[in-house]
Amino acid sequence: MRNVLTIAGKELRGFFVSPMGWVIMGLFALLFGYFFMAHLTYFVQQSMQAQGGGPININQFMIRPLLQNVALINLFLLPMITMRAYAEEKRSGTIELLLTSPVTDLEIILGKFLGAIGFYAALLAVTMLYIGILFAFGNPEWRPVLTGYFGLLLMGGCFLSVGLFISSTTKNQVVAGAATFVVFLLLWIISWLGQSAGPAMASVLDYLSIVWHFDDFGKGVIDTKHVIYYLSFITFGLFLTMKSVDTERWRG
Amino acid sequence: MIEVQHLTKRYGPFTAVDDVSFRVEQGEILGFLGPNGAGKTTTMRVLTGYMPATEGAATVAGYDVFAAPIEAKRRTGYLPETPPLYPDMTVREYLTFVAKLKLPASVTKAERVSRIDAVMAKTRVADMANRHCTKLSKGYKQRVGLAQALIHDPEVLILDEPTAGLDPKQIIETRDLIRSLAGDHTVILSTHILPEVSQTCQRVVIINRGRVVAIDTPDNLTRQLKGSATLYVQVDTAGADAAAALSGLSGVRLVSELDRHEQAVGFEISAEADRDVRRDVARLVVDKGWGLLEMRPLRLSLEDIFLQLTTDESAKPSASDAPVVTQAPPDPTPGDGAQSAPESEQPHA
């Protein structure tokens, strides 16, 4: 565990001492800010029109779609978090240090995953500033916000575990980044096929789609079905990473 | 301290290391010598647990590197060919990170800091402690790499070309440092620079195309192959028949003219095995009334041996040459060049 934390600390530090981490954070805040503005304007218009029927629910009409949009931002920005993870170590040769130190492959992988998810959590923390504004000027319910963020963390974890795996297969950061983006996109749009594949197939494909599982979290519901899906997805991603690191060892 | 038995590593159809066996005693410095691509780095990577071997076994400090990799790694310091530095860390941050990974959990923070200071002093990088690794010169990078390998005071040090890319002064300093480490540590270092081996190492493994072709001390290797059996003689005012006269001496096998400056002529004289022809040569020179300018035994430099052993054409030493492997390891399995016991000398029934 100590080794995991040492490596996680090194990874996390790597984001904040290089411009890259700050650039990603800035872009994340920028995109989230744009969505925030767009949703807020829409929400204000809606509540004006709905004056007769009393105030409309800010959780349902503002926060939930906003958090769902984070999934879209993740699609573009999370590949940049993981693309370096292994590719850069392999290119610069520092992987030789890690693999010849008295730590196990699993400790290295968990450390890298923890570092990546830590940075992602920092990104989410920035977005909480915007949500804070809503709390300052309105009175949204905090529980659905919390479950929403919990869901985002799990969803991000899935993306990051896949990204880690892809990064472990190549020396080239750009290849890792591009491939990760494509895989994320496929995991997102896999449910589109369902519309033409019949109801049975549709529910299977829906189930595979990473984003579909997020819906309930946004509504304030923590369904174990979704938690288990996300956790098993992450475990599978890390398992693939481990196999890939092992294979690389044999191949040299 | 280090024992390698029948180690083989294949990459697909390509055999990088082929049935290599050797052992290194405690406190010894072993030189790993071979042309580029001979399998030096691969062997070292197997020993450090970076990659598994296809066949064979390796033990470091009493631990099998395949069965107990963590224990073996705890006792091994490794400097890869390119020092594995993180560019955005300062030297101190980097060594702190490595120390956290390599030192046992029982070490306190204060002990860790003093350990880092001690290693930085030993490798003379303390003045760069707060500089980022990316801004270091090649010499400093190499030394920080060495500091990284030493941080947990390992019993075994494995250094892949520790002096590559350094300037002459740094090379001497690094060699001195490595020599000072022997005794406390067991060292394997690889190089393709030959003087380095004769100056630093107590024993040499010459490896070519993945096979061990010779294992011995640098001195023995140099002496063994031709040794005192060859003389260099320079004379002046000698007639054109000088070479023929020298050839006529008993025990002289071959005379060839090496150089000629005005009156002075230099000859290389090969004697038959175990014959000392120096007295006869000196007497002949005096009798003939030539001036004797120089006479010295010709030793093959390590370079010549290396080329002989690793170049195919001259891989097999001639019949009169002694075997290359004199201090045989438990099972040396020597390669082509070392299978030198000539059939003609072995009585057939």
Image (cartoon, rainbow, N blue to C red):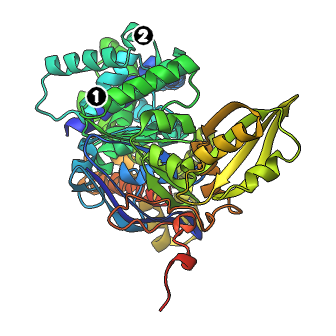
Q: Amino acid at mark 1?
A: Ile
Mark 2 burial class by Cα count in 10 Å: few <14, some 14-19, many 20+: some
Instruction: Pinpoint the chain carrying mark 1.
Output: B
Alpha carbon distance from label 2 to label 1: 17 Å
Farthest bottom residue in view: B349
Is residue A48 toward the left or the right of residue B318 in the image? left
From the viewer's side, name the closer residue of B236 and A233: B236
Measuring 39% from the left and 14% from the top, which residue is drawn there?
A: B125
How far from the left and from the top, in percent, is residue B148?
35, 29
Viewer-proximal residue, A51 or A59? A59
Residue wearing tag 2? B128
Labels 2 and 1 within one chain? yes
Q: Position of residue B319 (x, y in %)?
A: 60, 68
Furthest toward the front, the residue is: B287
The subunit carrying tag 2 is B
**In the rendered view, does B81 fall on the left or right side of B1?**
right
Q: According to the image, label 1 marks what residue? A: B151
Write down the quadrant of residue B272 in the picture.
bottom right
Which callout, 2 or 1, points at the residue further toward the start of the chain? 2
Q: What's the amino acid at mark 2?
A: Met
Q: Are marks 2 and 1 in contact (CB under 8 Å)?
A: no
- Kindly tell me whether residue A131 is visible in this rendering: no
Instruction: Give how far across and how far down residue B340 sits, in percent.
Output: 54, 68
